[in-house]
Amino acid sequence: MHGYILGEIRQSPQPLTVVEVEGIVARAHAMKREVASLPQAYLLDLLDRVGRAWSDPGYPCRREALSRLPDLIGFSPAMIEQGILVMADLLRRENLLTRLACDLGDSRFLDDWVFDNRFRGLIKAQPLGVVAHVSAGNVFVGGVDTLIQGIVTRNVNIMKMSSVDPVFPVLFAKSLRDHDGRGTVARSLALLSWKGGDREIEGVLKRECNAIVVYGGAEAVRSYREGLGLHTRLVEYGPKYSFVLVAGDELERRGLEACARLIARDGVMWEQSACSSPHVVYVEGRETAGRLMTALGAAFEQWAAEIPPGGLSDDEAVEITKVREMAKVEKAMGSGDLLHAAGTGWTLALRDDPQFETSCLNRTLIIKPVESLEAAVKCVEPMGEYIQTVAILADEGRSRRLARELSALGADRMVEIGRMAARKHGTPHDGTRGLASLVRWTSLSRNALEHGVDAAPWQRADVSGDTFDFLPDEERDAITFSRLVETVAYCRGRSPLLAERYGSLPVTTREEFRRLPLMTGDDYKKFLPPHGAGLLTGATGEGYVFSSGGTTGAPKAVYRTIDEQRHNAVRLGKGLALSVFGPGDVVANLLFAGNMWASFVSYNQALEHTGCRILPVSGNLPMEQIAGYLVTFGANAAITIPSVLLSLAAYVEHNNLPIRLRKVSTGGEHLFAGAKEYLRRTLGVEQFASTGYTTNDTGAIGYQCPHCDGGVHHVHEDLHLLEILDPETDEPLGPGRIGKVVVTNLQRRLMPTIRYEVGDLGRWIEGDCPCGRKTRLMELLGRSDDVLIIGGGNIHPEVVASAVHAVPGLSPHFQMVARLEEHRDQLLVRVERAADADPASDEAAVELVTRRLLAESKELKAVIDGGLAAPAKVEILPPGGITRNPKTGKIRLTVDDRH
């Protein structure tokens, strides 16, 4: 017995016994829980890496397959190569995700409870447990495909290998074992050989396995239906047949030779042994059928040079001879025609009888002229559910009508010519959603989930069903690290910049991850379009482009796909729903809109997940207009930056307006105690909350629950891995120690955010949160760089330096101070006079520096003109007038005096 048993390759001259099978099945059941707990990200990463290995022509398993399979299964090396490429494509992460999403409805169902807005409850898919697969011998890739389905649905898998090919599945298992760092998947496979029809062995599988997947002929399927265990699910993929429909007008429109090449390819692949391979080609009109036959002959010759035929058995050669002899007779009688290769390479038989018939395979096509394709459909009606794939060459409207008729008859797939052998990822398989057959569905109903908005296809974020946050540290960390490994592998493989920086550095442990170099904002400026290249992992066809930073020069661009933007909005909305907003709130979005800024768009989407009514007003309108909207539409809450809120409060107070905002969520600036008291008095604010810890570059990093205050946030651990590092050594810091914040976005793919220095200071907070969520707590303490936030705008030292340098009589020594002027932010710039300058020129210098500041910084001018900040002030001091550090002599570049 040759095979692979739960991680070990076995070679034994003795046949497999019933006792051995019982032991294997028992061991498989013992592994169910371990396999079911594997994170989806780990499985996808593992399978993707295996697929990439097989894509390498030098991979040892691939070379061995090419060496052994041609003699074993009768395919040429070129055909084996085609099969290997198909398998590698099946294993690619993006294709597996498509398959999961199409078959299960949502790729998340196997990982966690997912809220269903129509059911108003939680749904989860569970693996069936131990699944036995009975492989057919027609196409060697098919056995591996059924194993892939079992693995990605987290089942333990036992397979009866085809007697024709006991090699390729074992090579695949060996490859899995070589790449499976945990070893769990490799130990959850058993690939066995026994003589078909062994009732005792098959009886063990029928009684003890949770499901059996059978590929094969009618006899094989019937044998497994008998004696099936009460709770054993049978998934049948029995005999199926396929054909081609060719409309004369569409053939002429697309070109005879081009269409013939596509149809011939379908007849070449797998030597017609697949269920999807065509047996018959129905063509409208006898004259057209004859011309197509001639073109198909030329096309088969071309394909023979690219993918040579495999070897034939004596029986197969005899069957081809029979077809040719019969065709000669029909040709002589005027009811057919014949065209074939010099040898047995290919055969085309034209027959006037329109009834469907099976081919003898090995590149033998039967061409049947028909009056119309609709008449051909009538001819295949007796085939019913034996029809698998139909390639249709017709115009769009007719193709749909024909497909509707064929589907009603029992056909499973209708495709374009040339696509019969190329299964589209996510397509139903033989009338089923393949992966869905390998899971069972469970639900969780909770009273708290059953109240809310009417059912709709759109799905609101559900904080009560967010079980990830409540998992123990070790479980969350395992999921997070698996996603981390997947993220690094994906981005390294597609981003030229990261491929160069990371090289071959391994990332199998957190310690190895910390060896990856840090990213900074300068990387975004240098290596992203429109001013640079190298960081993106692909084309920027669809999605959002945001701009951050408002200093002179090129802005820093941020690229997000639609899915990434929505994913981020869900996390922002989760924080708002937990901390402040909910049904009954009428929330004015007073964040800044336009200028390619992200905040207004992102938080508008986030508010959709809170159940509130949204007023998308914008904070950069005239205050009179803002107040008018708030009064007219009854706003009782707002989300904005403190500067806008304080300007609104001053306007309301001055004009004695009836605006009361019970709840406010603010971000982007500090909201100091005195300002809060002022807002309570003027706007009636009762509840203050953070918009969450978020940046334009990285997205949502942290959120507040009702028990978080000030700068304390839970980390979005399912979206970000957050590090707090020593600013000098880049070593991780423990609880309470202040360091720089570094984040890795675990969902972002287009624009990688891996070990990115945000520019903030923070510290870990010890202890459990009273809310019960286990996600870690951190406190945001401010900026770690020298940027001052004034009125919501980022003011960089480079702006001030440029303005000071342009004015004669001033030294390069300056200091930026943020302070409050009647509850509004104000920028004060202190500059030292040059040693030889005349103090009498100070007044002119102040005016020049002020003018230059507003010209250099669009953000500063905007917040001042909008009343969000007090006018900037410049002070000229004598040489040495700015306080120095007594030990180092250094000037503190930025000072924040807002208290």
Image (cartoon, rainbow, N blue to C red):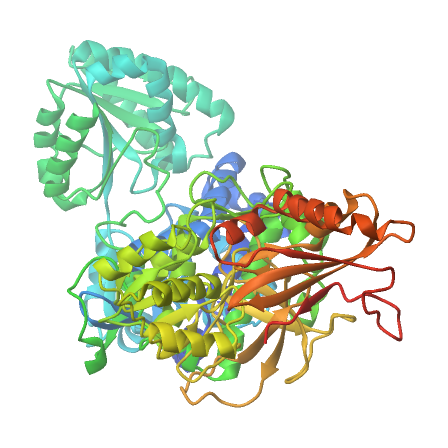
Q: Residue at x 23, y 71 (%)?
A: 583
- Residue 648 x, y percent position in the rendering: 39, 62
- Kindly indicate the quadrant of the structure image that contains residue 258: top left
Q: How many marks?
A: 0
Q: Is residue 49 above or below residue 580?
A: above
- Residue 701 x, y percent position in the rendering: 51, 67
Quick one: 674 or 34, which is closer to the camera? 674
462 left or right, relative to 536: left
Q: Is residue 554 above or below residue 227?
A: above
305 left or right, relative to 888: left
Quick one: 373 or 831, which is closer to the camera? 831
Q: Quadrant of the C terminus?
A: bottom right
Q: Residue at x 50, y 49 (%)?
A: 865
844 left or right, relative to 692: right
Residue 193 visible in rendering: no
Q: Residue at x 65, y 44 (%)?
A: 851
Residue 684 visible in rendering: yes
503 left or right, relative to 788: right
- Residue 259 x, y percent position in the rendering: 33, 20
| Residue that sits furthest to the front in the current view | 840
Quick one: 666 or 276, which is closer to the camera? 666
Q: Is residue 584 above or below residue 811?
A: below
